[in-house]
Image (cartoon, grey):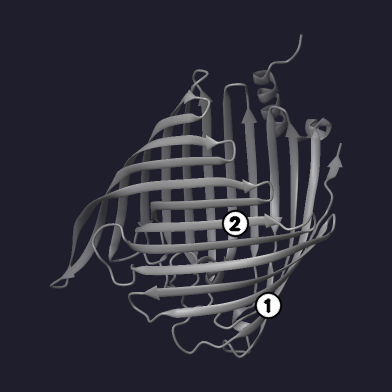
Amino acid sequence: MQATSRDRAWAFVALLLFPQAALAGNWYVDGSLQVDAGYDDNPLLLSDGEEGVFGTTVTPSLTLGWYAPAATVGFDLALPYNAFSGDGVEGGGGDLDSFDQHAGSFMTLRSPLTELSLDARYDRDTTRLSELTDSGVLSGNERRERLAGKFSVRRRLTPVDTVSLNLGIQDVSYSTSALTDYMALDGNGEFRRNLDPRTEVGLALRLSRFDPESSSEGETHSVGLQALAAYAVSPTLDLEVAAGFSYVERERNRLVGGVTVSDSEDAIGGLFDIAIAWEMTPVDQLQLSYNRSLQPSATGILRTQDAIGVDYSRALTPKWSFSLSGRFLNQEAAAGSSSGAERQYFSVEPELSWQFLPQWSLSASYRLRWQDRDTTDTAVSNAFFLTLQYSAPRLKLY
């Protein structure tokens, strides 16, 4: 009798418990090597005293995975090494040098009606990489360590109804007390219904908790509700919109007359998501997005963030392609007000790529960044990069 998908899923769980039996599965190895070289006239996006540096980043990466119709499991590892020279920072760029580590594992179990996923990640990098696109707060180039996990399950209830649950946790710490360590948890549950082949509607409930290690800041909790709608305008144009509200409660500790007094502030704000995917021509792709959400940060404050994204790509020839990506962020305290919470950030990066061999590509790009925070003056950065990448053919293991 033929095994069912449920049988295969349970068989996969057994393989995890008895790894020697997995030798009969579909194991594979993916590997790549990327070398980036360039110049940045303000690598830490400082508002004064900025000077340029030349930098090189070498990133080997490896993925070991196992695949079957009912299950996928894998492990990935990337080890970027960053080396800099020039007058931009103390030591001729040496303060920016770093050897980073990114490791993760993933697992997915599938059946005709249900899909379950587990992901775990460990990132050890620097604030030059993490905070400029997150909080905007830097204290030199310091170490950041991040542990993150995510659980998700999706279940089809009927031919037109689907429910999903997503839970995430991250623990972030820094090597300097100038930035605030924190733990953040978030979860959401969604119900979606297909009204017809082109239209989908739904509801989403969103919860979060932000717990900074700060003497002045306590926990921040939020709960939000959104209505969802997705519509295929044409075979080449998709539109998805979500709108709703969130309630945020922020606990604070104040020193009054030598005594610590705890109080709280709350606020009600909007939650919005707009995504447009447009295949303009067979060689032109455009994606536009707007998102208003709650984001943890190294400021020790949960922020409301408005994010606008633009991504355009065009295949010039079978080997040449052009892409343009842009991003704008506006951030402020989710409840109450705090010095250092308000920030605007903008970046744009055009790139020209050449696939000169099946596994080899070369690209050239320019990146402009702009930042304005309530505690510092405006900062601007111009950077140029050359990137060489090799992607090894997949190695199948039996």
Q: Position of residue 124 (x, y in %)?
A: 59, 63
User: Who's the residue at 53% across and 18% down the image?
Assistant: 159
Amino acid on which disc 1 is placed: Gly
Q: Nearer the viewer, mark 1 or mark 2?
A: 2
User: Is 61 drawn above or below residue 199 in the view shown?
Assistant: below
User: Is 266 drawn above or below residue 112 in the view shown?
Assistant: below
User: Is 322 drawn above or below residue 108 in the view shown?
Assistant: below
Task: Using a 10 Å C-alpha cutoff, classify the residue at mark 1 as few (fewer than 14 neighbours), some (14 to 19) or many (20 or more).
Answer: some
| Real-space CA distance between mark 1 and mark 2, rounded to the nearest whole angstrom | 23 Å
Amino acid on which disc 2 is placed: Tyr
Can residue 176 be seen by looking at this rendering? no
User: Who's the residue at 63% across and 28% down the image?
Assistant: 110
Q: Position of residue 295 (x, y in %)?
A: 40, 56
Q: Is residue 386 left or right of 122 when viewed as pictured?
A: right
Numbered tag placed on residue 38 in the rendering: 1
Q: Position of residue 226 (x, y in %)?
A: 35, 39
